[in-house]
Image (tube, rainbow, N blue to C red):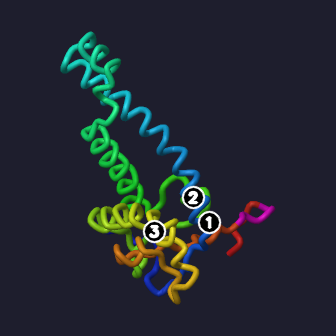
Amino acid sequence: MPRQFHDPESLFEPAPLLRRLLAMLYDGLICIAVLILATWGYTMFVAWIIGFDKYLEMAEAGAFNRDPMLTSVLFVILYLFFAYFWTRTGQTLGMQVWRIRIENYDGSSISWTQALKRYMAAYVSWIPAGLGYLWLLWDPRRETWPDKFSGTQVVAVPAPPKPAKNGKSPN
C-alpha cells in the first residue's frame, strides 16, 4: 500500500539540479561501500563453491577479470538498494541530507515497478553526457528523463519548522 507523504493538494517545488547532483554524489559514496561488500560476499561464495585453492589459481590466471555474473549481481543489488529507499520513504540517505524526495504526483510513495523504471532510465540518462538530467533545465515541468519514464517527480522537501526558544511549538 502506498504511503502518503503529504496532502495531494499540497504542491512541492521540483528539486533543483544542484541538489539532485549533490544527493547523487553522496549516494554514490554509499554505493561504493555497498558494492565493495557485495563483491566481497560474491567472491567468498564463489570461492567456497569451487574451492579456495582453485579460485585463487583461476583468479591469478585472470579468469574473473570480466565476470558477467558479478556484474549482474551488483546491478541487482544497487537496484534493491535504491528501490528499498524510494518505495519506503521516497529518500535515499543522500536525498535526506539534501531534502529532496521521489514521489508520485499525488504525494504518495512510488511502486517497485516505478523504481525499476527510474533505475533503468537513470543509466540511460548518463550515456549522452548526462543529458537526461540536464533535460530539467529546458523542461517546463522541470523533469528529468527518469522522472518522465517512471511517472514520478523529485521534489524539494521543506525544512521542518524550528522550535520556539521558549520550548513551545511555533503554532
**Residue 68 colored magenta?**
no
Horizontal side of residue 142 vs 105, given as left or right: right
Tell me which numbered mark, 2 or 3, is placed earlier along the sequence: 2
The amino acid marked with disc number 2 is Ala
Res 23 label: 2
Res 102 label: 3
Res 63 label: none
Residue denoted by label 1: 19
Which class describes the residues within 10 Å of circle 3: few (<14), some (14-19), or many (20+)?
A: many
Task: Please name the residue shown 31% across and 68% down the image.
Answer: 114
- How far, Cα to Cα, is label 2 from label 3? 12 Å
Label 2's element? helix
Segment tinted magenta in the rendering: 162-166
Residue 1 position, x and y percent, is 27, 66
**Residue 165 colored magenta?**
yes
Is 51 located above or below residue 118 in the figure? above
Label 3's element? strand
